[in-house]
Image (cartoon, rainbow, N blue to C red):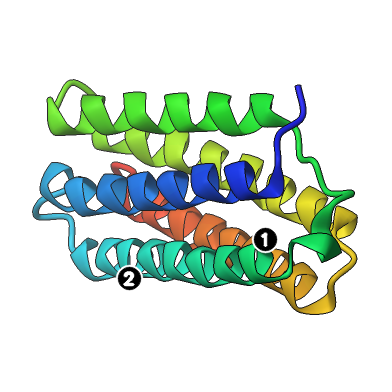
Amino acid sequence: MKTSLIDFMDKAISLETCFSECYEMMIQLGEGQGIAKDLRTLSYQEINHANILKTGKNFVLAEPDLFDQVTPTETEMDSGIGLTENLLRKIRGRVIEFNTAIGELYELEKLFERVHMDVAVTIKEPSLEALFKNLSKKDAEHKRILEHLMQMSMPG
């Protein structure tokens, strides 16, 4: 099912906010592993992404005629939001191991790196296209940080 760009951006804002909460809660879950700084950085960057998306949404609202042809797929966003919210519940409830949670976050970052790039390719307006390409690039950076955290937290 297709969705409007505004609906997509609203969902993306919710998703980025949920990612931020996951990273904040992971600080408690990974207590004593010396990784709080990296997780705080990831949390801050996700909030920054949400704010960037809000700015982009305001641009779309101001110039709607530029974006008529853009209709991203809703299924991946809804699925991703559900998976991220479920992960946040597990982290809050401390019913997930730190390494498992990091692995799930890694897979979600990988998914949304691709989703952001897919949206960037469909947008014809240069500044909004750049916004989504940048979000995709940042998701790739987040994956690298998560890979580092996975290596740090492995026993041995």
Q: Position of residue 38 (x, y in %)?
A: 31, 67
41 sits to left or right of 50: left
> Does 59 appear above or below 122?
below
Q: Quadrant of the N terminus?
A: top right
Quarter of the image where one finds residue 34: bottom left
Mark 1 lies on a secondary structure that is helix
**Sequence-wise, which precedes: disc 2 or disc 1?**
2
> Does 115 appear above or below 125?
above
Who's the residue at 46% across and 52% down the image? Answer: 13
Who's the residue at 34% across and 34% down the image? Answer: 101
Q: Disc 2 or disc 1, which is closer to the eye?
A: 1
| Numbered tag placed on residue 136 in the rendering | 1
Quarter of the image where one finds residue 140: bottom right
| Numbered tag placed on residue 76 in the rendering | none
Disc 2 residue type (three-letter): Thr
Q: How many marks?
A: 2
Who's the residue at 18% across and 21% down the image? Answer: 95
Q: On the image, numbered disc 2 is attached to which residue?
A: 41
> How much space separates mark 2 and mark 1, taking CA atoms?
17 Å
Q: Nearer the viewer, residue 119 or 148?
A: 119
For label 2, the crowd category at 10 Å Cα-Cα, with few meaning under 14, some 14 to 19 and many 20 or more, is some
Q: Quadrant of the C terminus?
A: top left
Outermost residue on the bottom side: it is 127
Mark 2 lies on a secondary structure that is helix
Is any atom of residue 141 visible in this view? no
